[in-house]
Amino acid sequence: MTETAANATADLSTLTSLCKRRGFLFQSSEVYGGVASMWDYGPLGVELKRNVKDHWWRQMVWNRDDMVGLDASILMNPAVWRASGHVDNFTDPLVDCKGCHKRWREDQLTDHQCPDCGGELTESRRFNLMFKTFMGPVESDAAVAYLRPETAQGIFVNFENVVNSTRRKLPFGIAQIGKAFRNEITTGNLIFRTREFEMLEIEYFVNPEAAEDWYRIWIEEGMRWYTSLGVNPDRLRIRPHDEKELSHYSVGTSDIEYLFPWGWGEIQGVANRTDYDLKAHSEASGHPLTYFDEVTKQHITPYIIEPSAGVDRAVLTFLT
């Protein structure tokens, strides 16, 4: 282990110990040996987390005329996840160590050796990150459901409901705070990467020709939110994704990253999702999810700019 890595591990260990002693974070199910990368918020931690969510909601929803809120259910019709591409595309390349039997994400390894023991690794295979469960008394293929891996799809399938009930005009956004679940292969760094987490998410609907401008605006808004709460701007940076990193729905994504003890880590992503999501759900459901422009008298499919941040990562940012 390098000196830098050793110092980062020591710093994180000190922070973890401090969080437990002061009542910010406890290892989940600790009396039974705990659960890897699962954390419970203690008396001070739950207040800090609530303050983060309340401040974000006040700034992003209550203080804006172009934003409304939503609270969609965690369990949705499985057809939602097929249409969104999550069933086929929400995967990571998984490899196993033939020596110590630990599992790793292949795309995070610098060479084809186990980082722990140096052992030989198996060939990679695709691993879907969604947690699968069953609805009803019978565990069968017909009863399969998924714990949502993101809150965004609940917003997309409610697009028409929100437009009809609020009479919003473009551009406008729908905001949501909620739990999401991802069966991550590798977790760690306290509450930075866990399998259960909470999201601060906005889907901002715009005219296609204005998408690039709003993409830049929301990157600036994201940076402003963190610095307004005292985060040192020297420990923040914007990292645009290269072409190989882009998700199947995105033509442009940038991460806002924070310099943690172990290095730079994403605390918010801003993506130009184009009209992919509304078109995908329109086609799969047979129900057009479009917007009627009163000026042009035409139905259009808006582009979507998505600022998405993690509550837990924001808490960790403020703790460090």
Image: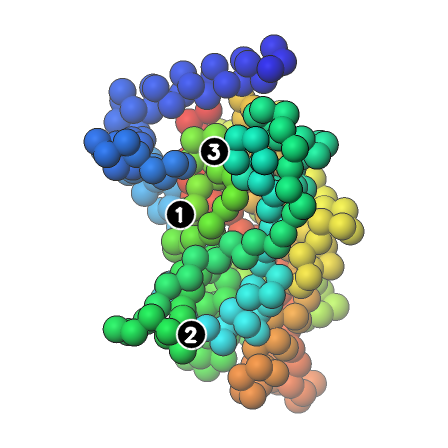
Q: Which residue is mark 3?
A: 188
Amino acid type of disc 2? Asp
C-alpha span from label 3 to label 2: 32 Å
Q: Residue furthest front?
A: 99
Q: Residue furthest top?
A: 3
Q: How is the image coloured?
A: rainbow
Residue drawn where x is 67% and y is 42% of the image: 107
Q: Which residue is mark 1?
A: 196
Which of these two is toward me, 31 or 39? 31
Badge 2 element? helix
Q: Which residue is mark 2?
A: 141
Indicate the quadrant where residue 170 lies: bottom right
Q: Is residue 54 above or below residue 11?
A: below
Amino acid type of disc 3? Gly
Residue 148 picture location, percent across and down: 44, 61
Mark 2 or mark 1, which is nearer to you?
A: 2
Residue 222 picture location, percent across and down: 57, 45
Residue 10 picture location, percent across and down: 47, 14
Residue 166 visible in the shown view: no
Name the mark on residue 39: none
